[in-house]
């Protein structure tokens, strides 16, 4: 379900483009541009952690990684343990802003379904993220 997380991230970044010139969103854009390589490296590390629902050890590692990403950005966070054994914790974070008039909630799953590596394109495998020059179905090449 990391795809859902990625889709949420992409949506958030897309919304940044619709902000007016006086909004704080420009700070976010500048931060992203300044830290692009660091952010991409961190995201690739995140994608490399297996997230199969039946693999509770790696799901706990994923939860801890998400918590660490939040804390690096000043988000007060915590892992909320599940009451059912073998179920990974929920990751909760909160940013309080004095005088805020709205509350924004982001929700995403970080567990996924088993994958069949044999069904992947040549040179690709699950949990080893790679960049391509374009979609492989449209002649893209793997970055090395």
Image (cartoon, rainbow, N blue to C red):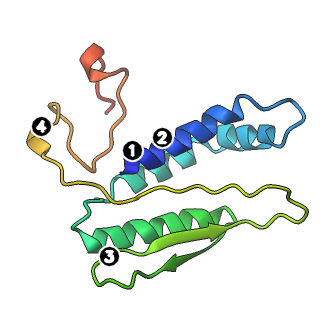
- Identify the mark nearer the N-term, 2 or 4: 2
Q: Which residue is mark 2?
A: 7
Disc assigned to residue 3: 1
Q: Is residue 25 left or right of residue 43?
A: right
Q: Residue at x 49, y 53 (%)?
A: 42
- Identify the mark nearer the N-term, 4 or 3: 3
Question: Please, is residue 114 above or below residue 135 in the view?
Answer: below
**Dot 3: element:** loop
Q: CA distance from mark 1 to mark 3?
A: 20 Å
Disc assigned to residue 87: 3
Screen quadrant of the C terminus: top left
Q: Residue at x 29, y 55 (%)?
A: 112
Q: Residues within 10 Å of mark 2 (few under 14, many from 20)?
A: few
**Dot 4: element:** helix
- Quarter of the image for residue 92 reads bottom right
Q: Look at the numbered discs 2 and 1 and tell me whether their residues touch, using CB distance below 8 Å.
A: yes
């Amino acid at each position: 379900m990391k795809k859902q997380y990625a889709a949420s991230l992409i949506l958030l970044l897309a919304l940044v483009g619709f902000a007016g010139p006086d909004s704080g969103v420009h700070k976010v854009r500048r931060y992203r541009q300044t830290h692009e390589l660091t952010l991409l490296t961190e995201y690739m590390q995140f994608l490399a952690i297996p997230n199969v629902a039946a693999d509770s050890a790696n799901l706990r590692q994923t939860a801890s990684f998400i918590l660490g990403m939040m804390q690096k950005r000043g988000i007060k966070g915590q892992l909320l343990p599940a009451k059912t054994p073998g179920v990974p914790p929920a990751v909760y974070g909160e940013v309080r802003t004095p005088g805020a008039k709205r509350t924004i909630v982001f929700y995403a799953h970080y567990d996924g379904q088993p994958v069949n590596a044999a069904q992947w394109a040549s040179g690709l495998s699950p949990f080893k993220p790679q960049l391509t020059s374009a979609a492989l179905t449209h002649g893209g090449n793997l970055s090395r």
